[in-house]
Image (spheres, rainbow, N blue to C red):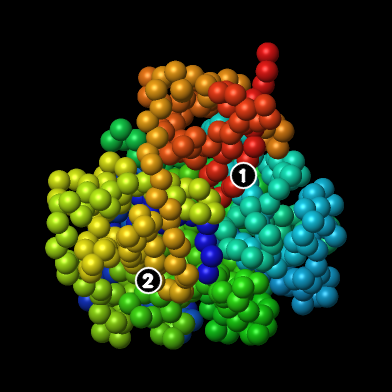
Amino acid sequence: MRRRPCILAIVFIIGAASPSPAQQPLPDSMRLALNRVFAAWTATDGPGCAAGVSRGGRVTYENGFGMANLETGTPITPASVFHVASVSKQFTAAAIMLLVADGAVSLDDDIRKYLAEIPDYGHRITIRHLLTHTSGLRDQWDLLYMARGRFEENRITESDVLEIAARQRALNFTPGTEYLYSNTGYTLAGTIVRRVTGKSLREFAHERIFQPLGMSDTHFHDDYTMVVRGRAAGYARRNGEWHVSLPNYDTYGATSLFTTVGDLLKWQSNFSTPRVLGDATLREMRASGTLTSGDTTAYGLGIATSLYRGARLVGHGGADAGYRTYLGEFPEHGLGVVVLCNAAQANPVGLARSVADVLLGASLAPEREPVRAAATPTAQELAGFAGVYVHPVTGAPSFVTLRGRTLVAGRTNGPELVPVGERRFRIAGQPVELEFRTNGDVVQTVLGWPPRPSVTLERRDPARPTRVQLDRYAGTYYSEELGATYTVSARDSTLVLQTRWSREWTLTPAYGDTFIGNRQVTFTRGRGGGGSKHRMHIITRRVAGFRFLKKTR
């Protein structure tokens, strides 16, 4: 499976919740073991999590930990309402699949049939491409952040997303050829629901999904100022203190579902006992997408598949502002897990896996043993491996650095590279192997699931420009696709990038005319050559190939 990001730069008051009539309570010893999973989130002066578990479609455990609102001292309970971020996507996909079942749309329809404002890129983009993240459309959050320079105090609407998507003159890749997560696709899918039915996604999902399943505390949130009873506020920790961190979105489809652990367990039970959509359609939502090359993506229609300790895990996580969420199921074990947290520092996926450790225990494969060194390269050999390695497609630089007698994956600090053979190393804690070739390049292989082809990273000389050379990059650059102007200023050894409302972003020389910071920036000369740089190209994690032209006085 082809993936664009370069992996070398790798660089979630414990209260007893009373079981509902539909619950099959766990033994006290098991409940206590599950409570201990969330022990780090039980403070009365900090946020926390709500958790729910089902076995065979029947609720066996629900509980709340920590505080839903630090200003009012309200604790989290299983009834607390959370913004669940990208967990929303499977419900948008389900809404589209209901329209497919109605005969109103087809997954293979060209999206321009419903979204005429999206440019014709010379390649057909289908609704299926939107839902499987294979459209090539640039991600809305990266676009808006690059255009505005910040999200704070700037309300984000569906119109904002449609406007900036319509400005784009290129795709990240040809539709269907690659997988790259794009929130834009799901916002557009929500717009298609509205244009086909005449109802907002909020109205349609309420009538066709939430109401039939009895999900009475669930809705798509289309007005971020709206009062929601029982809502857990989101928080992020800064400088040792908790601060309110709430999304300012009126856009939905990719995000903005508000719900509870109990309602999500009702949705999850629909996959084993269908009431909304048929069994074949629900299986299709969980099936892996396929690229034109035949490679699989491990992502279906709003639902991803992974392996944990040898067991198949289907689900989706979410992260917006101060919310971190996860909904997953181990189908072969009939175990469903929901973890909803209102702390940006929480790890709901890790907590959900710890819940599985408690409940599935010995039925899971043993934990992986830490990788141990199986070779002893000399200091001279280690020093020869340190350097800058560049992805052949994205141009993304990755750094291998020598720290004492140890190689690390990163420019300054990072995970250790453990020698496992002659010229072969494993990145500690990650299923990634590096093989250093005699020609100076390195082959990067991901050993996890699903299988992915290896990528050869090309070695480049590190850039060390002088102040005079840095001055040649300075100037004002404009992007028509963003409607944004950036200024570039030179410092002694770095560049500083800034747009209208943003703080300054420092760019550090990487190789050639490429710099890195919170984005990757490459400068090129226009016609006429000379020493000055006339164009600036910006790459982010989910956007490739932005071109800025330098303004002339």
Q: Residue at image x 28%, y 35%?
A: 240
- Place of residue 15 in the rendered image (x, y in percent of width and height, measured from the top left): 31, 60
What amino acid is at disc 1? Gly
5 over 315 or under it: above or below: above
**Label 1 neighbourhood size at 10 Å, few (<14), some (14-19), many (20+)?**
some
Residue 45 x, y percent position in the rendering = 29, 43
The image quarter containing residue 146 is top right
Q: Mark yes or no: residue 175 visible.
A: yes
Residue 423: percent from left, percent from top? 26, 63
* Quarter of the image where the C terminus is located: top right
Image: 277 above or below 175: below
* Element assignment for label 1: loop
Residue found at x 58% / y 27%: 533
The amino acid beneath tag 2 is Leu
Which residue is denoted by mark 1 in the rendering? 545
Look at the picture and state if 102 lies above or below 134.
Answer: below
Q: Where does label 2 land, which residue?
A: 447
Question: Residue 117: percent from the left, percent from the top?
Answer: 82, 48
Residue found 17% across the figure and 69% down from its top: 374
